[in-house]
Image: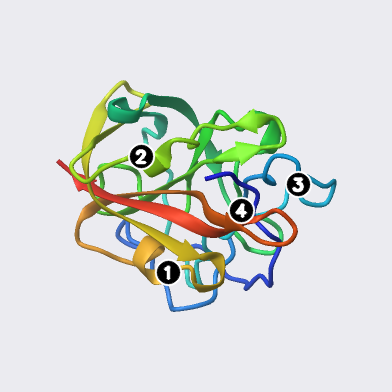
Amino acid sequence: MSSAPHPVRRPTGLPVLARLALVVTAVLTVLTGCSSAPGKTTPAAADSPAAVGSPSPGTAAAKQPAAVPTKVAIPSIGITSSLMKLGLNADRTVEVPPAEKGMTAGWYVGGSVPGEVGPAVIIGHNDTRFGKAVFHDLGKITKGADITVTDSRGASARFTVTGTQSVSKNSFPTEKVYGPTDERALRLVTCDGDFDAQGHPVNNLIVYAKLA
């Protein structure tokens, strides 16, 4: 899957962290980015956002965790990356790593800390205008694969993949990805699918996993 999301209509919203779970209503979603397919890159498309989700409004009850995730590893497909923090853009859509840091994934701070109850969300590019990015091979992941997230204290949480989903950016499953759950869940998100006329991938790939 090559990447670069097509800028589309973006909904607004604020993140909610309540008892380490997001309270999310069903809304249209727009996430951020990968870059255009090789040979189709344009200045406007290079860093355009891909659909990854826009959590809905609510009352934030966040308290800064003592330890935050700093590294993700998926041995079966050769992925290892440090993690940057991702928040919300000015328009309340979820941030993604900048294109120049395409080999670095990011943890959405409005979600749960990996290993705690609720959905933890990690976002990465498939490709950027600089070439292949951190989640370029994420489509090769299989059910049962291990994902390990290490925090700033050196503690690790190991997750097992339960399934994957490729979905149109125009119908991103916001509640399924960001909504409350009793599980200690992890979601990985990147770009996927065929390209539109502007060279943007039309889908997002979502990997679902739970604490092993």
The three-letter code of the residue at mark 1 reads Pro
* Residue extending furthest toward the left: 212
Quadrant showing the C terminus: top left
Could you say whether the residue bearing mark 2 is in a helix, strand or loop?
Answer: helix
Query: Which picture quadrant has residue 169?
Result: bottom right
The residue at the point 77 percent across, 51 percent down is 45
Cα separation between marks 3 and 2 = 24 Å
The three-letter code of the residue at mark 4 reads Thr
Cα separation between marks 4 and 2 = 21 Å
Q: Earlier in the sequence, mark 4 or mark 1?
A: 4
Q: Which mark is residue 198?
A: none
The residue at the point 22 percent across, 37 percent down is 145
Could you say whether the residue bearing mark 3 is in a helix, strand or loop?
Answer: loop
The three-letter code of the residue at mark 2 reads Lys
Q: Name the one closer to the observer, 152 or 165.
A: 165
Q: Where is residue 207? Give x, y as percent.
A: 35, 50
Residue position marked by numbered label 1 in the rendering: 173
Q: Where is residue 13? Give x, y as percent.
A: 57, 70
Residue position marked by numbered label 2 in the rendering: 140
The residue at the point 61 percent across, 53 percent down is 32
Q: Earlier in the sequence, mark 1 or mark 2?
A: 2
Could you say whether the residue bearing mark 4 is in a helix, strand or loop?
Answer: loop
Q: Which mark is residue 40?
A: 3
